[in-house]
Image (cartoon, grey):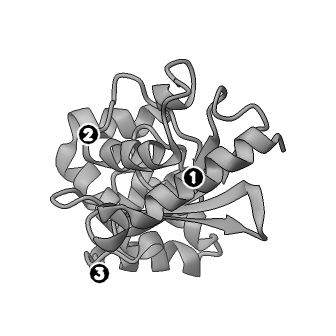
Amino acid sequence: MANMSVLRIKRELGEVMRGDEIVQGMIKIELVNDSWTNLRGEIAGPKDTPYEGGKFALEIKVPETYPFSPPKVRFTTRVWHPNISTATGTICRDILKDNWAAAMTLRTVLLSLQALLSTAQPDDPQDAFIAYQYKVKPDMFQLTAEHWTNVYAGGPHVSIECNTKVQCLKEMGTDEHEARTLLSKENWNLERAIERLFR
């Protein structure tokens, strides 16, 4: 990696470590295997959202052309959100693509992703079904996002009904995550999920 990029990343990591956000537990960033190009980030789910109380891990790959090219970032914690792929963790966020500027930092990326959890952009979705659910069935979206946050990110909202339905599909031989995804996409209607499973 170019020396300029390494110096910039070292400075930015220091900025995050000294910032109020790390003290408040809002964001965290660290090297993976002492590599300056492979980082692990973490953001706390924002208050008053279905993600509150969850901790969401991020994989951050920094290119050699950083800061002139954006880092490649994806969620490694599964999350139910219109702008984040439930399958890969890929993020639909303009600052990670066309609107990147060299003045942006790893700290601003983490804070931007935390803000994305607060204010989804359903008209520019990564997952069209979740965007539809967010706009048309907000209560179902809230339930599903809270359930995923509890299961995958350690959030506080336990849904016994959701857990029971997932267990029912597991007992039919379905993988737990596949069962959860199927039920989520069927708005937790167990009969429809079973029909779709055995089509």
Return the disc, 2 or 3, that comes first in the chain's sequence: 2
Residue 187, image x and y in percent? 33, 52
Q: Nearer the viewer, mark 1 or mark 3?
A: 1
Mark sitting on residue 83? none
Q: Residue furthest top?
A: 98
Return the disc, 1 or 3, that comes first in the chain's sequence: 1
Q: Residue 3 occupies which quadrant of the picture? A: top right
The residue indicated by pointer 2 is 119
Q: Is residue 108 left or right of residue 187?
A: right
Viewer can see residue 194: no
Which image quarter is the N terminus in? Answer: top right
Q: Give 58 or 85, whichever is nearer the viewer.
A: 58
Q: Is residue 94 left or right of residue 71?
A: left
Q: Where 168 falls versus 88 (above or below)?
A: below
Q: Residue at x 64, y 71 (%)?
A: 175
Going by the numbered disc 3, the residue's amino acid type is Ile
SS at mark 2? Answer: loop
The residue indicated by pointer 3 is 160
Residue 126, image x and y in percent? 50, 33
Q: Calculate the distance from the C-alpha at mark 2 to the C-alpha at mark 3.
A: 27 Å
Q: Residue 45 occupies which quadrant of the picture? A: bottom left
Mark sitting on residue 11? 1
Q: Calculate the distance from the C-alpha at mark 1 to the C-alpha at mark 3.
A: 46 Å
Residue 68, image x and y in percent? 65, 26
